[in-house]
Amino acid sequence: MQFPEYCYDDRRAGLLCKKGKKMNALIINCSPVKNGATAEIVKIANDCIKQKYDTTTVCIDDYKFNFCKGCRTCHSTAKCIQHDDFDSLINEFEKADIVICVSPSYWADVPGQFKAFIDRCTPWCNTHEPHASLSRGKKGYSIVLRTGPNMKECERLISTIEHFYGHMEIESVDRIGFCSIEFKEAVNSIKNEIIEFCKKI
């Protein structure tokens, strides 16, 4: 993986550095549940990469913001007419070099709270001009889970997250899905797989 803006890549120390500092990683719990299986995966991922990156973990439920109004004002101004906690969350995306979205399946897609956040990102969507832009070079990863046994549902979640990454011009690098995970106690059975996945980040 290449990060051309970074001044050195010290693999011996396990650090990617920019101007002498670690890169920033944002890990987002896309579930409104703060102590469930998704939150447990966020914790494992954070423990795995925090020596390599300066990490920030957030839960979508920590932020209170309105739905997109569909007014399309941002299509001509590249700005949203609403100002609420969305502004704080998109700022976390701006600060991050690495973004890891961890999402459960709610009716075969990402939870509505995270979908509402995606909708509010329309000013940053690269399908219209003018549009706002995050700083370049961000890398995105997806970790998804569902309670049932069908991996196709995980693939649908990954598709939603990577579609979002694409329009935000975040490069999708890797992804992993887990089936038959409902409660956080079940996460222990996939802990080693999560760690191996995170070692590649």
Image (spheres, grey):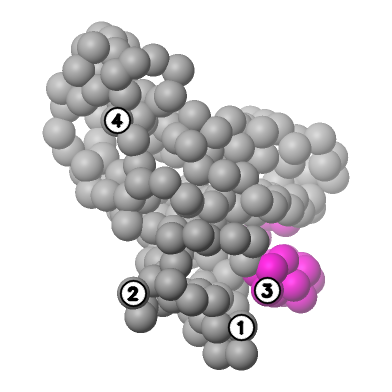
Q: Mark 4 highlights which residue?
A: 132
Q: Which image quadrant for residue 157? A: top right
Q: Mark 1 highlights which residue?
A: 11
Disc 2 to disc 1, C-alpha distance = 16 Å
For marks 3 and 4, give the one nearer the viewer: 4
The reply to whether discs 3 and 1 touch (Cβ–Cβ < 8 Å) is: no
- 85 or 2, which lies in front? 2
* Element on which disc 1 rests: loop
Q: Residue furthest bottom?
A: 12
Residue 111 vs residue 186: left or right?
left
Residue 80 vs residue 158: left or right?
left
The magenta stretch spans which residues?
181-200
* Element on which disc 2 rests: loop
Residue 194: percent from left, percent from top: 70, 68
**Reading the chain from its start, which is encountered first: label 2 or label 1?**
1
Disc 3 to disc 4, C-alpha distance = 32 Å
- 15 or 111, which lies in front? 15
Q: Which disc, if any, is residue 185?
A: none
* Element on which disc 4 rests: loop
Residue 29: percent from left, percent from top: 48, 55
Q: For the residue marked with disc 4, what is the amino acid?
A: Ala
Disc 2 to disc 4, C-alpha distance = 26 Å
Q: Mark 3 highlights which residue?
A: 199
Q: Is residue 110 visible?
A: no
Q: Main secondary structure of the magenta part?
A: helix
Q: Which image quadrant for residue 171? A: top right
Q: Mark 2 highlights which residue?
A: 19
- 161 or 11, which lies in front? 11
Q: For the residue marked with disc 2, what is the amino acid?
A: Lys
Q: Quadrant of the N terminus?
A: bottom right
Disc 3 to disc 2, C-alpha distance = 23 Å
Q: Is residue 180 visible?
A: yes
